[in-house]
Amino acid sequence: MNLPFHSYAVNVSDSNTRLILHERIFRNIHLKEIESREERHKGFVIIIAGTDLPVSERQLNRIIKRTVTGLSRTGSIITTESGEVAIGFSTATRIPHDQTSQCMSVPMIHEEEIDNAFRAIGEATEEAVLNSLITARHVVGRDGNERPALKDLLEKHTIKR
């Protein structure tokens, strides 16, 4: 069964999550980066997932809830003050703009096959987070707050790529 899930947008703004992920992948990076500053805001993650898999609204909601498995694999933790938002859509069914005289038939996968979709959305979410970390750039925000890029942390801690 082909499961074409793609995470279209992931915004990882939580530097703790980012550095925990670095620690997990590259054991030599120390958490001193986050110990040196106290952060009140725990950050947020926004995930937008799209698929052409034919699913019902209930099935799509169940699949979207599984995006947290991908976040967990990257070292992210869900806390009281963090914000995780996941939305999704399926393009499998086209709804005509004009009303037809007949009832519509909406195809959906069988419940026996939904475990594959759960696995696929977790993997797509994990890949999107890792991709965003690899392509991230060093940023300077309000009040001079800085967040280094992964490549800068690797150089700072002398980890060879």
Image: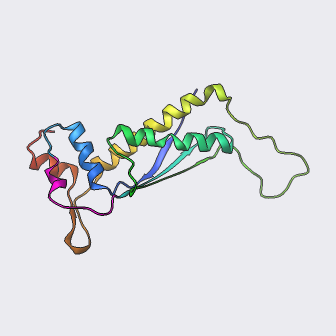
Q: Is residue 141 above or below residue 81?
A: below
Which residue is nearer to you in this view: 26 or 149?
Answer: 26
Name the chief secondary structure element in magenta.
loop
- Residue drawn at (17%, 48%) of the image: 31
User: Does residue 97 appear to the left or right of 24 in the view shown?
Assistant: right
Q: How is the image coloured?
A: rainbow
Which residue is nearer to you in this view: 32 or 142?
Answer: 32
* Residue 146 in which image quadrant: bottom left
- Residue drawn at (29%, 63%) of the image: 40
User: Does residue 9 appear to the left or right of 23 in the view shown?
Assistant: right
The x and y percentages for residue 152 are 16, 52
Residue 46 lies within the magenta run: no
The quadrant of the rendering that contains the C terminus is top left
Label tally: 0
Give the residues in magenta.
Answer: 31-42
Residue 2 appears in the figure: no
The x and y percentages for residue 79 are 38, 51
The x and y percentages for residue 102 are 90, 47
- Residue drawn at (48%, 42%) of the image: 67
The x and y percentages for residue 73 are 36, 37
- Seen as rendered, the residue at the extreme bottom is 143
Which residue is nearer to you in this view: 18 or 134?
Answer: 18
- Seen as rendered, the residue at the extreme right is 101
The quadrant of the rendering that contains the N terminus is top right
- Residue drawn at (11%, 40%) of the image: 159
Residue 97 appears in the figure: yes
- Seen as rendered, the residue at the extreme front is 80
